[in-house]
């Protein structure tokens, strides 16, 4: 757990509060930081009142856990809320969302090129879910890691998918939703894995696991995972929508110039340090009140985060991934730069710091 060596990006940042939080965490954490006992991938967690609710795929089904803390989720009872009785196939990366007081779980199911997004819903978090409904996403292409959020008075779905019918690369797409279960209009690409630091491991090259959050200025961010999840090069990066930008216009999005949370120094954005205790951190979840980005935290303190990773000193395999608790905070006056594209070459605003 380390702060940036450069403090010039910390405008409007309450440094003393962050230092106190970091020192407290450093003294309290064991050698493996926030490693939980849950040997699994792709955490999705939200907070409702004082209860933390997590969803997880387990061999042809989906379970929900509830606990009084993120650390307590691993030992909480797992209640089965959906089973693949129709032979949908591999069940990946469920995401739990709360909209209008109702719970929605989005997940991908299928085999190979057949993976598509599905949704189930219930009035309660751990029982009473409907049968699965396939989302009628525009173009009906391979799709995983979908999640719903509201921004600018509009519901949106963001996911990782293919442009066509072959596995060349995984891009991030966004579409408007007229309801939590009904897409409206076209899909729009917002990110492709075209930067050198997100093409260290590929075939295919990957942008996946997008998660929305709103910064203290009200600007939208999509934090996503880059590089292959089968490699310790897996990391988190950021897309920041320019102030007043259109979420459907790719050139209104500015990408961080490197990983913001990763274990390899060569791919980190300048001023961001690699992890101390884990390899390949990725597929995270911002633990927000009601899962609502309107409750995104302000500048200053640190806030809860969960992600999966492999402990350092352990072979990097999918089977060795654990859920981890961590924290994040906003980091001000950070410039993302680009070249040879429409629009200004730089955009300055909030970025994020992640802590194990």
Image: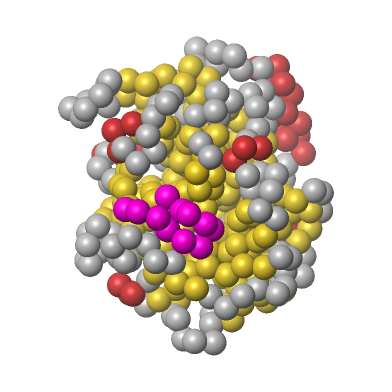
Near-viewer residue (29 or 239): 239
Can residue 325 be found in the magenta stretch? no
Q: Residue at x 31, y 37 (%)?
A: 249
Q: Residue at x 39, y 51 (%)?
A: 175
Q: Which secondary structure is most common in the magenta stretch?
A: strand
| Residue 66 visible to an observer of this rendering | yes
Q: Percent position (x, y) of residue 354?
A: 56, 36
How many badges with numbers are in the image? 0
Question: Which region of the structure is painted magenta?
Answer: 176-186
Q: Percent position (x, y) of residue 288?
A: 66, 44
- Name the image quarter holding residue 244: top left
In the rendered image, the residue lying farthest to the left is 340
Q: Residue at x 79, y 58 (%)?
A: 67
Can residue 180 be found in the magenta stretch? yes
Near-viewer residue (188 or 321): 188
- Name the image quarter holding residue 235: top left
Q: Percent position (x, y) of residue 197?
A: 31, 39
Near-viewer residue (288 or 338): 288
The answer to whether residue 333 is left or right of residue 55 is left
Q: Where does the N terminus fall, quadrant-wise?
A: top right
The answer to whether residue 134 is left or right of residue 54 is left
Q: Residue at x 46, y 86 (%)?
A: 87
Is the residue 224 above or below the residue 128 in the image?
Answer: above
How is colour applied across the structure in the image? secondary structure
Q: Where does the C terminus fall, quadrant-wise?
A: top right
């Amino acid at each position: 757990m380390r702060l940036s060596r450069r403090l010039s990006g910390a405008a409007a940042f309450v440094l003393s509060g962050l230092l106190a939080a970091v020192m407290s965490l450093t003294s309290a954490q064991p050698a493996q930081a926030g490693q939980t006992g849950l040997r699994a991938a792709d955490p999705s967690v939200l907070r409702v009142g004082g209860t933390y609710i997590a969803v997880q795929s387990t061999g042809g089904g989906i379970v929900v856990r509830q606990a009084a803390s993120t650390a307590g989720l691993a030992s909480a009872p797992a209640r089965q809320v959906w089973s693949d009785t129709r032979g949908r196939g591999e069940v990946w990366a469920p995401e739990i969302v709360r909209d209008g007081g109702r719970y929605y779980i989005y997940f991908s199911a299928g085999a190979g090129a057949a993976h598509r997004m599905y949704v189930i819903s219930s009035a309660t978090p751990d029982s009473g879910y409907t049968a699965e409904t396939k989302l009628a996403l525009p173009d009906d292409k391979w799709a995983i890691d979908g999640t719903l959020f509201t921004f600018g008075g509009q519901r949106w779905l963001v996911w990782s998918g293919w442009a066509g019918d072959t596995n060349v690369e995984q891009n991030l797409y966004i579409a408007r939703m007229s309801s939590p279960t009904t897409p409206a209009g076209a899909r729009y690409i917002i990110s492709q894995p075209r930067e050198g630091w997100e093409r260290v491991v590929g075939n295919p090259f990957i942008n996946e696991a997008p998660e929305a959050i709103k910064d203290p200025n009200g600007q939208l961010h999509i934090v996503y995972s880059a590089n292959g999840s089968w490699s310790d090069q897996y990391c988190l990066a950021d897309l920041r929508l320019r102030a007043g930008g259109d979420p459907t216009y790719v050139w209104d999005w500015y990408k961080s110039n490197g990983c913001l949370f990763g274990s390899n120094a060569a791919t980190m954005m300048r001023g961001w340090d690699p992890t101390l205790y884990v390899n390949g951190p990725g597929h995270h979840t911002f633990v927000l009140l009601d899962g609502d980005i309107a409750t995104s935290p302000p500048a200053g303190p640190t806030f809860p985060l969960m992600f999966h990773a492999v402990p350092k000193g352990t072979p990097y395999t999918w089977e060795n991934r654990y859920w981890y608790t961590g924290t994040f905070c906003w980091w001000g006056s950070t410039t993302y730069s680009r070249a040879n594209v429409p629009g200004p070459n730089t955009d300055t605003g909030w970025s994020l710091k992640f802590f194990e």
